[in-house]
Amino acid sequence: MSVQSILDVATEVLLAKPSASLGDVAKAAGVSRTTLHKRYATRHDLLVALSHDAYDRVEKAMTDAQLDVPGSEVEAALERAIAGLIPIGPRIEFMYRQIGLDDVPDLVARYEQTGEPLLRLVRRGQEAGIIRSDMPDWWIVSTLDASFYSAWEAISVGRLAPLDAPALVMKTVMRGIGT
């Protein structure tokens, strides 16, 4: 089983049962505990690897959305970002749920860096009069994060179809922050 497949299974297992052991993850992945321990000596090591994988996926979604392309429309760029982030919801949900990783400096740095493209897009939208300027940019990004999380949660329990989520998030956010 590939490293990526193990990380995929580990995300599912740990979201379903946050207290799952490395043994639980190994069993679900169909690998021996020894195989898993060779790659991740401790549960903490696995959590750090899962967090880095989630950040990699978020960064790719932000890059693919072309948020910083000069001349691109803010609203269209935001739609692309939302559409790119919805499918990786479980990874991001996993990151949000993890406590105890705040002491990993490179994860803290990645957290701060990962939000920058959306923050710049919001500022550009505020300057263009497309996004409300009477709200702090950080608040608008936090509102986006909360909307993403709500969509992922609704998808995971079957209340929202994954294909309907991007439009719902976009409508919710733009009617709340739009001018």
Image: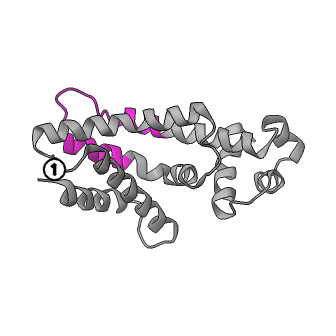
Q: Nearer the viewer, residue 71 or 144?
A: 144
Residue located 32% across and 39% down the image: 118
Residue located 80% across and 42% down the image: 42
Q: Which of 149 and 29 is in front in this view?
A: 149
| Image vertical order of residue 109 relative to residue 146, above or below | above
State the residue position of label 1. Answer: 134
Q: Is residue 73 in sight in this rendering?
A: no
Residue located 52% across and 38% down the image: 55
The type of colouring in the image is one colour
Residue located 11% across and 38% down the image: 128
The picture quadrant where one finds residue 169 is: bottom left
| Type of amino acid at the residue the image marks with label 1 | Asp
Looking at this rendering, what residue extends furthest in the top direction? 70
Q: What x and y, as percent, mark residue 14?
A: 68, 57
* Secondary structure, magenta segment, majority class: helix
Q: Is residue 69 in sight in this rendering?
A: yes
Span colored in magenta: 58-83
Q: Which of 62 and 100 is in front in this view?
A: 100
* Magenta stretch: includes residue 72: yes
Quarter of the image where the N terminus is located: top right
Q: What x and y, as percent, mark residue 46?
A: 72, 42
Q: Seen in the image, is 78 located left or right of residue 112?
A: left
Q: What x and y, as percent, mark residue 54?
A: 55, 42
| Image vertical order of residue 68 relative to residue 135, above or below | above
